[in-house]
Amino acid sequence: MKANILDFGLFEYHLKNETSLADSSIRNYCYVIKQFLQRNPDIDVVDDYISFLIETAYKPNKSAYHNYYGLKKFIEFKFDSTEAHRLLKVIPRPKLKDPKTSRVMLSREKLNEVIMNFKNDKHKVIAVIQKFTGARAGDIIRLRKGDIRIEEVNHRRVLRFNIKGKGGKLNTTYIYNKDIQDYIINYLQLDKKEEEKINWLKDKELYEEFYFVQQIKEDIVRRCKYEKEELRLINRNYIWYWEDLKQALDGCKIDIKSFSTHDFRRCFANCVWEDTKDIILLKRLLNHKHLDTTERYLRFNTLDSRKVLETIQEV
């Protein structure tokens, strides 16, 4: 059976509206399937999938991953469970090394050192929010005006973050530490009047609907009126943040291959775990849907199990 352009449109709609995938994953998978369908394949024939994987996986550790899982999502969308299982059973899954095995878990002090080595003040603020909330860098960069608020809870000032995560899930989290609040408030000018904010935004060259999205030169990208242009701008700002992080890591003598923007989230998870040993609380803070997702963030070892057994077995 030959696929057609309608299949791609329906697949894209399915990913955007019926899955909890991140925007970046949806873009990657749609790109893969667009390439696949341009070859005019017979989607019932396994060899067409396998040849596509072999011919397009020029960088095995990354492209092969995206290509395989893009095809997997398409097959699961297009066929019933029995037929999908038949196809996926014979399509070779790429053997990737586990990226988490080579990650470094930085101490709180070392994280502070990395943050201080950022060149850009805006990126320092993003990293601080990551460190103390565990939010993804992309989700922070996408924060719109009004998503960060100064509130009072039980006669105590708090900084509230309404963060839109994977699949559009809303995660409301707070920063209670007054010094960290002051640092973020002062940078974002959250306590200024509206007319003062406008002048401040122009000075910072920020896209007016966001806190952290800097505009590209007007002759390249004008005012973002369409979703794709807006996403392109957000992605560009993420790349700038990642490039600044790599320089900060280099300044701290940390291998840039062992730490990424997402490792702020992993460090946050392990800090919460070390302080509380409460995985249900951690799941809620990370806004995970499934507990096994939370478990992958933690470094369990036999020593943890031994300590627990020794404690409960004490007479």
Image (tube, grey):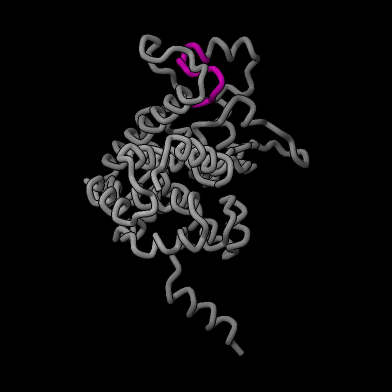
Q: Is residue 72 visible?
A: yes
- Secondary structure, magenta segment, majority class: loop
Measured along the vertical axis of the image, is residue 161 above or below residue 236? below
Measured along the vertical axis of the image, is residue 239 above or below residue 134? above
> In this image, 174 relative to 112: left or right?
right
> In this image, 284 relative to 15: left or right?
right
Residue drawn at (46%, 40%) of the image: 7
Q: Nearer the viewer, residue 192 or 16?
A: 16
| Residue 64 picture location, percent across and down | 30, 50
Magenta range:
201-212
Residue drawn at (29%, 36%) of the image: 247
| Residue 172 picture location, percent across and down | 64, 42
| Residue 15 picture location, percent across and down | 51, 43
Measured along the vertical axis of the image, is residue 308 above or below residue 233? below
The answer to whether residue 205 is magenta is yes
| Residue 48 picture location, percent across and down | 30, 51
Q: Is residue 117 visible?
A: no
The answer to whether residue 226 is magenta is no
Q: Nearer the viewer, residue 77 or 167?
A: 77
> In this image, 71 relative to 159: left or right?
left
On-image quarter of the C terminus: bottom right
Q: Nearer the viewer, residue 224 or 56?
A: 56
Measured along the vertical axis of the image, is residue 79 above or below residue 18? below
Residue drawn at (62%, 61%) of the image: 280
